[in-house]
Image (tube, rainbow, N blue to C red):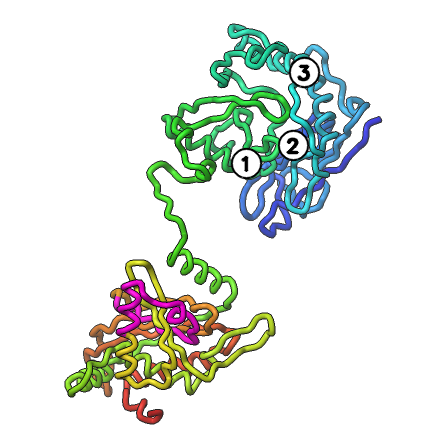
Amino acid sequence: MAQVLEFKLPDLGEGLTEAEIVRWLVQVGDVVAVDQPVVEVETAKAMVEVPCPYGGVVTARFGEEGAELPVGAPLLTVAVGEGAEGHRPAADPGTDGGAARAGEQPGAGERRSEGSGNVLVGYGTSEAPARRRRVRPQGRASGAAAGSGTAGAGTAGSGTAGAGSSGAGVPGRANGRVRVAEPVDGPVPVISPLVRRLARDNDLDLRELTGSGPDGLILRADVEYALRAAAAQGGRAVRETGPHPDGTVREQALAATAATEPAGVAGSAVPPGDVRIPLKGVRGAVADKLARSRREIPDATCWVDADATELMRARAAMNAASGPKISLVALLARICTAALARFPELNSTVDTQAREIVRFDHVHLGFAAQTDRGLVVPVVRDAHARDAEALTSEFARLTEAARAGRLTPGELTGGTFTLNNYGVFGVDGSTPIVNHPEAAMLGVGRIVPKPWVHEGELAVRQVVQLSLTFDHRVCDGGTAGGFLRYVADCVEQPAVLLRTL
């Protein structure tokens, strides 16, 4: 006896809660196969075809074209099992549609007994039980060829399908490869509506592909690979077939260079001539740390322009005197340590497990250094206890070690605050990414002559842009703004530092 099953609008992913019916692909009374697209819907993300997980006769549809349905609302009902034909209008036995549907129904029912592979987000039938690879019976294969008509005619010149030895029953088989003129009948093993749309938009027949997923499931990578193969051969794809898990034979578009393609490259959207660069070593470590910072730290950035004319004059005066030269980054570091003494909230980290903010009583100052091996961040220990001359010496030592690749793990870890002088690259501003697990980073742009109002008069001054990116969990904008304003005041009037020396 036939059983009527209800198919509801599945969750199409990406947080979507509703979809609009654009076009019905089946009518009441139509026979549908497992995973056959039954309706085209449009979401806030894309237009997709929704496959039905049941094989049988459509008994009802819910919603007209243009209607908007929420996820979980009924889409249609399907009668499955014996007697399902009684739920559809009688078809003229002489028409092709009636004959084809009558021939498809047993196959659809059989596939349903194995469970649909259609597992969309929040929806799916039971998982198909493990099964052995089996050879499709000759009778069913002949029936499919007869139903398709043209397929039988196309292979007549090459022989007939029979239960002979390997290769004897498959037309045109040579050296383990089969070339056929037409795709075989039957449902297409595709789960994702996006895969169906990708194939449709590029005029690719999914019946010509053998999926690389479980039980021959066609993945997006399979479609992209077939499209690249066709493009590489000027739009002419080589159709190569192989045994499908259910015994059928399907065609697959392969690139002429597929045999030489490195393992792991197949199925990825990398056009010929592009280069793959492994994320490993320093580059990989930097990538991991930056990604973790973006995932875990709710950062915010504030910035201000400052007149650095007096700071540059003070440095020139220091270097004119006897003794070692003082670097600009050392003066900026000295300003940072003085600012952190006033705003210790930014010299901290967040212990997510304990849900605590840990404020440090010392400043281990990291600074970004670009090397031939990539970006590294050496750390100046106890920067708060060093004067400008000592800071200059330590910056020089660590920079030389970084460029020579001689930094030790201890010199690259343990920072509590980072100074990033990206002005050396000739840029004015940036939004630095916090150096996880620290709480803040000060960025310094290039110092360039600009028009500036100085003592009520328009003048050309040495101007720099300062930016502070901070972890909003450790403080609010008032604290961050106070820190940045103090740094700017020290840049504009270095004598302000005398208060903390």
- Residue 221 to residue 409: above or below: above
Dot label at residue 139: none
Residue at figure coordinates x 48%, y 78% from the top left:
348
Per the image, label 1 sits on a secondary structure element best described as loop
Residue 137: assigned label:
3
Using the numbered discs, state the Cα–Cα distance from disc 1 to disc 2 in whole angstroms. Answer: 14 Å
Q: How many marks?
A: 3
Other residues around mark 3 within 10 Å, as few (<14) / some (14–19) / many (≥20): few
Disc number lying in front (1 or 3): 3
What amino acid type is highlighted by mark number 2? Asp
Query: Residue 44: percent from the left, percent from the top?
Result: 56, 48
Name the residue: 24% across, 81% down: 453
Determine the image quadrant of residue 46.
top right
Q: Which residue is mark 2?
A: 35
Question: Where does the image place residue 29, in percent across and percent down from the top left?
Answer: 73, 26
Is residue 28 shown above or below 151? below
Query: Where residue 383 appears, x then y in whole percent?
Result: 36, 81
Front disc: 1 or 2:
1
Image position of 302 (left or right of 321): right
**Residue named by callout 1:** 219
Mark 2 or 3, nearer chain start: 2
Left or right, 159 with reference to 412: right
Cα distance between the residues tagged 2 and 3? 22 Å
Q: Amino acid at mark 3?
A: Pro
Residue type marked 1: Leu
**Image quadrant containing the C terminus:** bottom left
Q: Earlier in the sequence, mark 1 or mark 2?
A: 2
Comparing 408 with 153, the one in front is 408
Magenta highlight range: 396-424
Where is residue 440, by image quadrant?
bottom left
